[in-house]
Amino acid sequence: MKVVLQNLTKIFPSRNKKVKGEVVAVNDFTFEIPDGKLIGLLGPSGCGKSTTLYMISGLQKPTSGKIFFGDDDVTELSTENRGIGLVFQNYALYPHMTVKQNIMFPLQNLQGADKLSKAEMLERAETAAKLVQIDDLMDRKPSELSGGQQQRVAIARALVKMPRVLLLDEPLSNLDARLRLQTREEIRRIQKETGITTVFVTHDQEEAMSISDMIVVMKLGVVQQIGKPQDVYDDPTNLFVAKFLGTPPINVFNGRVKDGTVYIGEDAVVTGTDVSDREVIIGIRPEGFELDENGPLQCTLSNVEVMGRDVSIVSKNDASVNPVIRSIINSDHKIDTTVETVRYSVKLHKFFLFDKETEERIYFEVK
């Protein structure tokens, strides 16, 4: 089911009685979610991602704009009539019911032509339970389940209605690190098997990038960039996106361009660009450094962290915005930890320039 968001805006009245005004939670969001794809809404707290999800679900009404499921305008349609499955962060399971009863509960409220017999409801519940691999837990109560198992029950309950669209609101944030990894892989598997169009809300960029077909990066209610996860990582449109994606985070420097040469401090790190003279912000991905004894960028060595396959070199530079610089290199390189400085050359496809004032990306070519 294709989902189209057309100039979607949500404005809330300010809760601060001393300051009159309004809070724009989502501002003019336009996007077409392709049929059968998993889309990650990504951003920090307060960016509008959950509000967007709630408008798609019908739990909140947009201030302006339209929502279409396929060719159907569902903007004014109630939640129960939209054909959505919704999974919350806190699972919202009924503690007095068994797993089976929790999964079957949405089917018991169906009326008219959609009403099912008890046998049909049980069959659907068992199919949904098998899909999320909890069919051996059907007679347990939620209190007898682990967090990961409870999350699977919540997903099965959302899937049992055979929804047109599945909506997941930070479904992994209550799980420990190992369960989070396992459950996100399960969500991806389930989505691929069912082919249901899915919207996944998270503030965790690793989660979003690992399972999404496309990600939508948001900030203060405004969409910053939309694209395939790797494309957004490799080609950020502004400094916010560049900083938000990546672990370890991108290294940021104050720099300048003079006569086509990009400087970090007094070090001429890139020459022959077509950028006009100006102050700039420079971003270099951790994997964008190459150890080079004749390299143009000199940094003070602080520490070397061996991580098996890779080595993380921790260094400092007076022009760095970050407290330290982290560069990731292959462990085949042997680093002399007794030296005071390290020198780098940079990989141009991991090296970004941003406008000092607007923080928008400056695209450049090297002659």
Image: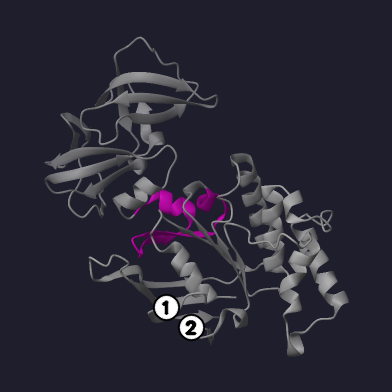
Q: Position of residue 248 (x, y in %)?
A: 42, 37
Tag 2: amino acid: Thr
Q: Label 2 belongs to which residue?
A: 75
Q: Position of residue 153 (x, y in %)?
A: 72, 59
Residue at 37% x, 28% y is 290
- Marks 1/2 in contact by CB < 8 Å: the verdict is yes
Q: Label 1 belongs to which residue?
A: 62
Q: Is residue 121 above or below residue 92?
A: below
The answer to which of 9 and 234 lies nearer the viewer is 9
Is residue 249 something that shows in the picture?
yes
The answer to which of 107 and 202 lies nearer the viewer is 107
Number of disc labels: 2
Q: Which mark is residue 93?
A: none
Quadrant for the N terminus in the image: bottom right
Q: Please, what secondary structure does the residue beneath circle 1 have?
A: loop
Magenta includes 209? yes
Find the residue positioned furthest to the bottom: 112
Give the residues in magenta. Answer: 207-236
Tag 1: amino acid: Pro
Q: Position of residue 247 (x, y in %)?
A: 44, 39
Q: Please, what secondary structure does the residue beneath circle 2 have?
A: loop
Label 2 environment density (alpha carbons within 10 Å; few <14, some 14–19, many ≥20): many
